[in-house]
Image: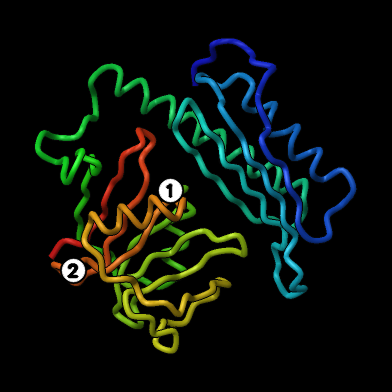
Amino acid sequence: MGVRGVRADVPVVETSGHGELPVGALGYLQRTIVALLRPAPEPVLGVRIRLTRLPDPAVTHPMVAQANVDLGGRLLRVQVTAGTAAEAADLLAARLRRRLEQAHTDRYRHSRGEGRDAPGTQQGPGARVSRRKSYRLATCSVDEALAEMEGCDYDFHLFTEAGSGQDSVLYRDVAGPRLAQLHPQPDQVAPHTATVSISGHPAPPLTTEQAIDRLGLSGLPFLFYRDEDSHRGHLLYRRYDGRYGVIAPAG
């Protein structure tokens, strides 16, 4: 990742802790993240850091660390779980470093005119959807979907859950991985070893424009919804350029 010089003025907008945390844990987390961001290749406009210790003694990785970074107007969000606060801070820094490197690569490719969306892909008023992806969803278990999500460092993963046959999305929540389904069938979900919570709320039936309006009001990074035309699960997400992308099943 290219470096334009050290910036000592990285703003930490919010550093918060929840649960029983070791003495000095928040300070170490903040110093680790700020040190990583000082040589960032673009201005860091804001940072929100959070460290949570989950109260359930049965959870093997009770520490949850999150960082939300405004990098030159692009929002980067990373989250990790770990056994200790120090490990969580180190893992969060490593994951954020990869995101920064990817953001720098994307910016470089964009400046060279590479990787731009093909003409005609923008849809709706103001062309707010700038990228659409359509592919045949993999049919797999929650464990397999989680491995794919973690291996590729995704915030979410759209797939067909093997047991229920439902269009589903697995994503990172503050308490750990969470599964949302088109029509929730928790009792039909295939056996898995990962600790994953399952939402009981069905995906709302929406058009793309309605989904954009709802996502804009929520402030969340993505929205899983049932497309009114195809009746399949679609995923609307925020892009670094302020517009939106849509992931949809093919076939």
Q: How many marks?
A: 2
| Numbered badge on residue 61 | none
Q: Quadrant of the C terminus?
A: bottom left
Residue 185 % position (x, y): 39, 85
Q: Residue at 20% across / 56% down in the picture? A: 135
Foreground: 14 or 3?
14
Horizontal and vertical percent for residue 173? 55, 61
Sequence-wise first label, 1 or 2: 1
Above-or-below relation of 13 to 147: above
The answer to whether the residues at label 1 and label 2 have Cβ atoms under 8 Å apart is no
The span from disc 1 to disc 2 (Cα, nearest Å) is 30 Å
Mark 1 against mark 2, which lies toward the viewer? 2
The amino acid marked with disc number 1 is Cys
Q: Residue at x 31, y 39 (%)?
A: 243
Q: Is residue 32 left or right of residue 150?
A: right
Residue assigned mark 1: 152
Q: State whether residue 18 is above or below residue 97.
A: below
**Which residue is the extreme one toward the bottom?**
187
Tell me which residue sits at (37%, 24%) in the image: 107
Neighbourhood count class around disc 1 (C-alpha, 10 Å): few under 14, some 14–19, many 20 upward: few
| Three-letter amino acid code at the position of disc 2 | Glu
Residue 215, picture quadrant: bottom left
> Along the horizontal axis of the image, is 100 left or right of 138?
right
Q: Position of residue 211 (x, y in %)?
A: 30, 58
- Picture residue at 41% right of the left edge, 71% below the top: 180
> Which residue is tagged 2?
228
